[in-house]
Image: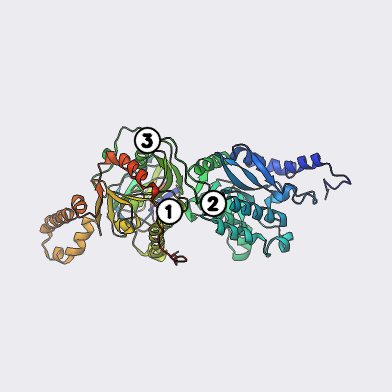
C-alpha cells in the first residue's frame, strides 16, 4: 500500500478515480486548483485505488494524502 | 603487513605493474559485485584514449600497500579537448585520503588552473585516513586546500563530478563545489555523518539510501544533479555534457552542424492550449525548438516545475530555463528558484546564451513556502538572472504574471529581446484574481444571480486591457511571433547576438541573497 499525496497546497477541484479503480503509472487521479491553475496529480505507480482520503472542494496542504493505492 | 616492494633491489617493471593493479583482489571482487568498475577502466572508457599522462604514479610506493596512494591523477583528451582528472581507487583502503592522496589532488587542480582546462573528479572515497590526520587534514596543503582550489577554479574551468561511490564527511564537499554532480543509483552517496554516526551522536536511525543516497540527493536535496542507473551511463552523460562547454571561461563552445528538430505530427500552434489555466507539457515545446537529440538536462528529478538544460539550436549551444505547467502549474517554488540560479550562473560563466520560456502564474504563496524562505530564494534567482551578461532571450509562451515575469527575464531585466507568442498574457495577475481583488466589495453587494455576468464582463474588460497586441504597440514586448515560426526567429536572434560583450557593473562583487 502506498499513498498519492498533493505536491502543493490547493483546493481539490476534481477527483478522477473512485475506490476500486485500476490506474496506470502516470495517470492523473485528481486535479487541484491552486494559484488559479489546474494542477494534475498523477499516480507514480500502477495499481488499484484503495481509499480516497479527500473530497472535492477540500483544501489540501503539500504532502496531504489524496488516496491510497495498492 | 606484507610489503610487496621493499626487496633489496626494486624491479621497475614489477613495481609498475603492481601499482597499476591497484588494491587486493578481494576489493576488486567486491567492487565488481556492486557493478563498480576499476578506476583505470573508468578512465579508459571516459577519455578518448585513456590518460595521456599520469602524475605521481609512484606516490607512497615505499609503503607497499597503498598503490598510487589511492588516487589516479593526470591529463587526457575528452571529445578532443584536454582535461585534467582525479580518480579515487576504492580498492586501495576504500579510496581514503592520506597525505600524498591530498597532495596529488591539489597538484592536478593546480595543473588544471595553469593549463586552463576542465577538471573532472571521479569520486569513490571513504574520506580522510584518520590515522594520517596530522599530515593530511589541518595544514596549508591539507584537504582544506582542495576545496579552496575548487572555489577558485569555479567559473574559470568547468568542474564535473562523477560520483561512483561514497563521498563522506569533508569529502562530500568535492561534489558540492563542482558545476555538476552525476550520481550512480545504488552506489553513490553523500553525507556529512554516516548512518552509524547519526545513530550514535543524534540518536537517529536511518538507512544510507534514505539519508544520503543518489535518488534522495537528485530529487529532494538538490545536491546531486543527474541520476543514472550505472557507471557506463554516468560516463556517457558526462561525455555528452562536455560537448556543450569550452575549455575555460575565455573561450566559446564550438558550433556544430545544424540539425532539424525531431519530427512531430502536432505543431507548436496545436500544442499550446488557449486556456491559460490548463496544463501542457513544456518538454513538447522544447523538442520542437531544438536540434534533434541535443537536450542535456540538468536536475531533471529536482523541482520539476522548472526545466533547466543545455541544447543546440542551429548547431549553437544554448541554456534553456523553462517553466513546466504540467508540474505544480509551473509555479516557482524555493527549490526551483534555487535550481534556476545555479544553472544561469553555469551558463553565464562559460558564455552560453540563455533562452527563457515563460509560462508562469507567479511564485507560490502560503505558509509552507514563506517558512522555507521563498522570498530570499526568489531574490537569488532574480539576482543571478539580472547579472548574466550572455545573450538573454525571453519568450513569453502563455502567461507571465507578477514576479514570475521578472524572474523569467522580463523586459526590465535587459533581455536582448522579449518575444511573445499570440497566446502570451502579461499582467500583475490573471483575470480571475484581478477581478476578485479590484471588485471584491462590489461583487459582494450584488444579488447572487447577477454576480457571474458581472464577473465575466469585468474579466473580458481586463483581458482587453492586457491584450498582447496592445503591449506590442506600447513596445513592452519587442515582437509577436507565430508559434510555428519560433525556431526560425530564435536561430536568427542567437546568430546576431553572438558578439554581445558587456560588463554588468563595476564593483568588487554583489552581496548575494542566498
Q: Which mark is residue B24?
A: none
Regarding mark 3 in the picture, which secondary structure is present there? loop
Q: Is residue B388 left or right of residue B460?
A: right
Relative image position of residue B179 (x, y in whole percent): 51, 52
Q: Which residue is mark 1?
A: B344
Q: Earlier in the sequence, mark 2 or mark 1?
A: 2
Q: Earlier in the sequence, mark 1 or mark 3?
A: 3
Mark 2 to mark 1: distance in Å? 16 Å
Q: Nearer the viewer, mark 2 or mark 1?
A: 2
Mark 1 to mark 3: distance in Å? 24 Å
Q: Are marks 1 and 3 in contact (CB under 8 Å)?
A: no
Q: Nearer the viewer, residue B410 or B67?
A: B410
Q: Residues within 10 Å of mark 3 (few under 14, many from 20)?
A: some
Q: Nearer the viewer, residue B468 or A56?
A: B468
Q: Which mark is residue B261?
A: 3
Which chain letter matches label 1?
B
**Residue farthest right in this picture:** B8
Render colour scheme: rainbow
Mark 3 to mark 2: distance in Å? 31 Å
Residue B397 in sight here: no
Q: Which residue is mark 2?
A: B157
Q: Earlier in the sequence, mark 3 or mark 2?
A: 2
Regarding mark 2 in the picture, which secondary structure is present there? loop
Q: Is residue B468 left or right of residue B164?
A: left
Which chain letter matches label 3?
B
Regarding mark 1 in the picture, which secondary structure is present there? helix
Relative image position of residue B468 (x, y in whole percent): 21, 51
Q: Nearer the viewer, residue B216 or A19?
A: B216
Amino acid at each position: 500500500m502506498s499513498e498519492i499525496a498533493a505536491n502543493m497546497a490547493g483546493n481539490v477541484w476534481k477527483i478522477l478515480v473512485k475506490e476500486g479503480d485500476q490506474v496506470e503509472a502516470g495517470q492523473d487521479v485528481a486535479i487541484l486548483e491552486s494559484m488559479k491553475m489546474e494542477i494534475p496529480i498523477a499516480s507514480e505507480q500502477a495499481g488499484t485505488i484503495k481509499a480516497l482520503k479527500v473530497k472535492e472542494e477540500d483544501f489540501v496542504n503539500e504532502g496531504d494524502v489524496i488516496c491510497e493505492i495498492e | 603487513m606484507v610489503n610487496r616492494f621493499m626487496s633489496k633491489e626494486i624491479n621497475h617493471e614489477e613495481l609498475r605493474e603492481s601499482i597499476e593493479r591497484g588494491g587486493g583482489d578481494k576489493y576488486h571482487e567486491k567492487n565488481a559485485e556492486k557493478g563498480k568498475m576499476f578506476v583505470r577502466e573508468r578512465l579508459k572508457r571516459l577519455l578518448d584514449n585513456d590518460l595521456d599522462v599520469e602524475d605521481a604514479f609512484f606516490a607512497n610506493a615505499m609503503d607497499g600497500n597503498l598503490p598510487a596512494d589511492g588516487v589516479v591523477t593526470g591529463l587526457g583528451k575528452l571529445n578532443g579537448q584536454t582535461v585534467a582528472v582525479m580518480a579515487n581507487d576504492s580498492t586501495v583502503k576504500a579510496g581514503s585520503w592520506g597525505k600524498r592522496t591530498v597532495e596529488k589532488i591539489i597538484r592536478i587542480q593546480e595543473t588544471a588552473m595553469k593549463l586552463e582546462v576542465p577538471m573532472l573528479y571521479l569520486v569513490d572515497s571513504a574520506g580522510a585516513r584518520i590515522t594520517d590526520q596530522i599530515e593530511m587534514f589541518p595544514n596549508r596543503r591539507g584537504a582544506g586546500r582542495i576545496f579552496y582550489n575548487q572555489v577558485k577554479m569555479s567559473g574559470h574551468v568547468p568542474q564535473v563530478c562523477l560520483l561512483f561511490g561514497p563521498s563522506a564527511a569533508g569529502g562530500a564537499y568535492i561534489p558540492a563545489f563542482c558545476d555538476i554532480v552525476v550520481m550512480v543509483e545504488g552506489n553513490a552517496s553523500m553525507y556529512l555523518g554516516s548512518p552509524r554516526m547519526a545513530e550514535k551522536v543524534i540518536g537517529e536511525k536511518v538507512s544510507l539510501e534514505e539519508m544520503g543516497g543518489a535518488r534522495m540527493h537528485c530529487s529532494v536535496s538538490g545536491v546531486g544533479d543527474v541520476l543514472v542507473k550505472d557507471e557506463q551511463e554516468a560516463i556517457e552523460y558526462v561525455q555528452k555534457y562536455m560537448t556543450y562547454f569550452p575549455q575555460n571561461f575565455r573561450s566559446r563552445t564550438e558550433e556544430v552542424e545544424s540539425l532539424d528538430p525531431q519530427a512531430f505530427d502536432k505543431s507548436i500552434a496545436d500544442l499550446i492550449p488557449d486556456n491559460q489555466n490548463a496544463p501542457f507539457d513544456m518538454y513538447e515545446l522544447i523538442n520542437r525548438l531544438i536540434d534533434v537529440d541535443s537536450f542535456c538536462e540538468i536536475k531533471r528529478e529536482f523541482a520539476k516545475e522548472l526545466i533547466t538544460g543545455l541544447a543546440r539550436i542551429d548547431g549553437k549551444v544554448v541554456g534553456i530555463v523553462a517553466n513546466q505547467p504540467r508540474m505544480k502549474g509551473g509555479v516557482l517554488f524555493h527549490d526551483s528558484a534555487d535550481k534556476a540560479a545555479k544553472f544561469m550562473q553555469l551558463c553565464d560563466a562559460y558564455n552560453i546564451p540563455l533562452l527563457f520560456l515563460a509560462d508562469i502564474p507567479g511564485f507560490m504563496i502560503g505558509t509552507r513556502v514563506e517558512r522555507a524562505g521563498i522570498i530570499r530564494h526568489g531574490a537569488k534567482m532574480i539576482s543571478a538572472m539580472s547579472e548574466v551578461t550572455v545573450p538573454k532571450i525571453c519568450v513569453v509562451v502563455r502567461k507571465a504574471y507578477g514576479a514570475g515575469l521578472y524572474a523569467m527575464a522580463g523586459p526590465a531585466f535587459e533581455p536582448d529581446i522579449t518575444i511573445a507568442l499570440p497566446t502570451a498574457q502579461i499582467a500583475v495577475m490573471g483575470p480571475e484574481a484581478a477581478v476578485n481583488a479590484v471588485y471584491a466589495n462590489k461583487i459582494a453587494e450584488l444579488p447572487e444571480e447577477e454576480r457571474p455576468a458581472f464577473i465575466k464582463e469585468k474579466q473580458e474588460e481586463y483581458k482587453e486591457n492586457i491584450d498582447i497586441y496592445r503591449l506590442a504597440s506600447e513596445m513592452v514586448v519587442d515582437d509577436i511571433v507565430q508559434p510555428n515560426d519560433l525556431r526560425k526567429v530564435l536561430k536568427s536572434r542567437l546568430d546576431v547576438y553572438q558578439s554581445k560583450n558587456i560588463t554588468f557593473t563595476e564593483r568588487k562583487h554583489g552581496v548575494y541573497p542566498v
